[in-house]
Amino acid sequence: MNYAIIAAGEGSRLVQEGVKKPKPLVELNGEPMIGRLIRIFTQCNAESISIIVNREMTEVKEFLDTVKLDVPLNVVVKSTPSSMHSFYELSRIMPQGKFCLTTVDTIFKEQDFSRYIAAYEAEGNECDGMMAVTPFIDDEKPLYVDVDSQMWVGGFYDAPFEGARYISGGVYALDGKAVKVLEKCMERGISRMRNFQRALIENGLKLKAYAIDKIIDVDHAGDIATAENFIRS
């Protein structure tokens, strides 16, 4: 499995709230968030890890320069207008094939993630992607995911709907078909990851959802302690 991390955001809210370190280097229980993800990925049979970092965050690039892995570590340094644009830049350096993409501030428990990856790999070619979803609403603007009884995804919505159980967890396991849809989105001037996810459905990709009890984001200074306690629990 190839893995990719979007770490190109400015983390402006953390800065405004007094956090001096760049978001990817914010430590959770003594481990930088980006380092934690790299470690988890290597434990989940990583064949490669690709990362995009903001051009202004020189400290993050310097940290990555010290990382030694037994698999390729591909790094692109570029400031982008949205996470979808960051994904596009990553798609140009990632190896072809199946991959798992997440943002650097998406926090999950290691055992939940490993089970998620195992579930996606077990699907074989039965689906074109598996989206991590959660019933826990931590996002300020959640993306609601419509699923049927077998967890096939029917759509992505900005507002809750009758029977809504899950929101997007910000972790995406996909294959090459998704990259082709991404390229179409870029050509059409579409932005934002949620619109890309809608485009996957519109283009006929078969997506399954995988439920994880709790996934949280680190957007504010107060989220750091919450994430640390969550990981330890």
Image (tube, grey):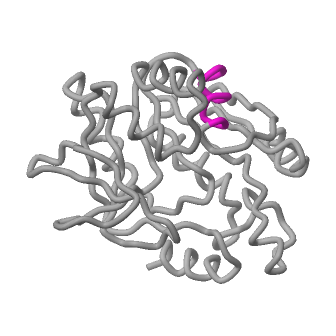
Residue 21 lies, in percent from the top left, at 84, 66
Residue 29 lies, in percent from the top left, at 64, 73
Can see residue 69?
A: yes
On screen, residue 165 versus residue 2, left or right, reads left
- Residue 4, by quadrant, is top right
Dominant secondary structure of the magenta stretch? helix
208 relative to 165, above or below = above
Identify the residue at horizontal 38%, vertical 40% (top origin): 198
Residue 218 lies, in percent from the top left, at 61, 69
Between 101 and 160, the one lying in front of the other is 160
Identify the residue at horizontal 82%, vertical 42% (top origin): 66
Residue 208 lies, in percent from the top left, at 24, 41
122 relative to 203, above or below = below
Q: Please state the total of marks drawn on the protein image.
A: 0
Between 213 and 32, the one lying in front of the other is 213
Farthest residue, direction front: 188
Farthest residue, direction left: 149
Identify the residue at horizontal 71%, vertical 68% (top origin): 27
Between 38 and 99, the one lying in front of the other is 99
> Can you say which quadrant of the picture contains the C terminus?
bottom left
Can see residue 111?
A: no
On screen, residue 161 versus residue 110, left or right, reads left
Identify the residue at horizontal 78%, vertical 56% (top origin): 10
124 relative to 33, above or below = above
- Residue 214, by quadrant, is bottom left
Between 211 and 199, the one lying in front of the other is 199
On screen, residue 228 versus residue 160, left or right, reads right
In the image, residue 214 lies in the stretch drawn in magenta = no
In the image, residue 88 lies in the stretch drawn in magenta = yes
On screen, residue 55 versus residue 134, left or right, reads right
Magenta segment, which residues?
85-94
> Can you say which quadrant of the picture contains the N terminus?
top left
